[in-house]
Image (cartoon, helix red, strand yellow):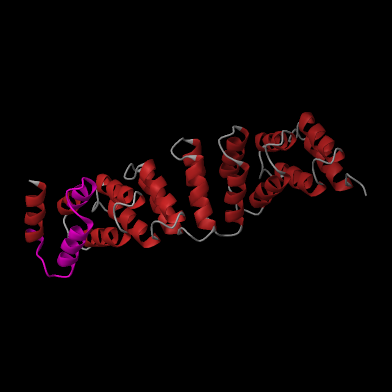
Amino acid sequence: GNVLSLDLVTNLLEGITGNLLSLDLVNNLVGGLLGGLLSLDLVNNLVGGLLGNVLSLDLVTNLLEGITGNLLSLDLVNNLVGGLLGGLLSLDLVNNLVGGLLGNMLSLDIANDLVGGLLGGLLSLDLVNNLVGGLLGGLLSLDLVNNLVGGLLGNVLSLDLVTNLLEGITGNLLSLDLVNNLVGGVLGGLLSLDLVNNLVGGLLGGVLSLDIANDLVGGLLGGLLSLDLVNNLVGGLLGGLLSLDLVNNLVGGLLGDVLSLDLVNNLVGGVLGGLLSLDLVNNLVGGLLGD
């Protein structure tokens, strides 16, 4: 069949005479079509988007450069352009995605996942903006974003949790190490989603300190603390039944081999069950630790 349509040629000429399209760009579009690199649909969308001011000349130039340099896939470009024309993606986001890909700050896999998640309604525009912005700004690592997006698309992580994690990182309430451990722990089945939600909620709410969160998660991942115990410690803190000092001392005693897991379990269980008073347990632990 014909590689060019009458409509397209009319639009290309109109774009050139109206100074909306450069001669270079038109040459590249026509060359891409004739060489089988570009589809007629895509070129129609690119030219239509340019003539309708939905796409910028810079973006289209970058898209073509990405396709010819094998940095962008035709599928991704189709999705980006379709998403823009359909109002599902913003020009800023697409510019950032394409810029990140051309600058090797984003992988094609992650871009596909982000755009696919957006177009499929699994990811919000705000979230994707934050993920891409965090990557380009050096706040987030590619591994972490891969894990966050993979966890979301696989229904292992919740949208609320990921939003909170990003908020915590940008607000300096969560460290990148801790977030990596939390996400890795959930994806690896070592941490429960409930626990991570509680830890993050406690940190963002100022009920938990970053030190204690690091100790709890580190102890869990290192096999020194049990999931039940950490759940009880975090639950007790959030419920106001345990004090931050006591939890610090209990975890410190465990990690320092001064307290046994059985003893700590019994002390925490006793307080949570109303059998022991917080004062008594504080005194017992203080005496054992030599405070």
Q: Position of residue 274 (x, y in %)?
A: 13, 70
Residue 230 visible in the shown view: yes
Residue name at image x 68 percent, y 40 percent: 72
Residue 16, x across and y down, in percent: 79, 34
> Where residue 283 sits in the image (x, y, percent)?
6, 55
Identify the residue shown where x is 7% and y is 59%: 279
Q: Magenta span covers which residues?
A: 250-279
Image quadrant in which you'd find residue 18: top right
Relative placement, left or right, of 127 versus 9 is: left
Q: Residue at x 45, y 40 (%)?
A: 140
Q: Residue furthest right?
A: 1
> Is most of the magenta stretch helix, strand or loop?
helix
Q: Image height check: is 157 above or below 132?
A: below
- Residue 125 appears in view: no
Q: Is residue 252 magenta?
A: yes
Q: Front-most of 96 and 224?
A: 224
| Residue 123 vertical position relative to residue 134 in the rendered view, above or below | below
Q: Is 229 one of the magenta-colored residues?
A: no
Residue 165 placed where, x, y %? 39, 50
In terms of depth relative to the viewer, which is nearer, 107 or 287? Answer: 287
Which residue appears at 31% of the width and 55% of the height? 199
From the viewer's side, name the closer residue of 110 and 249. 249
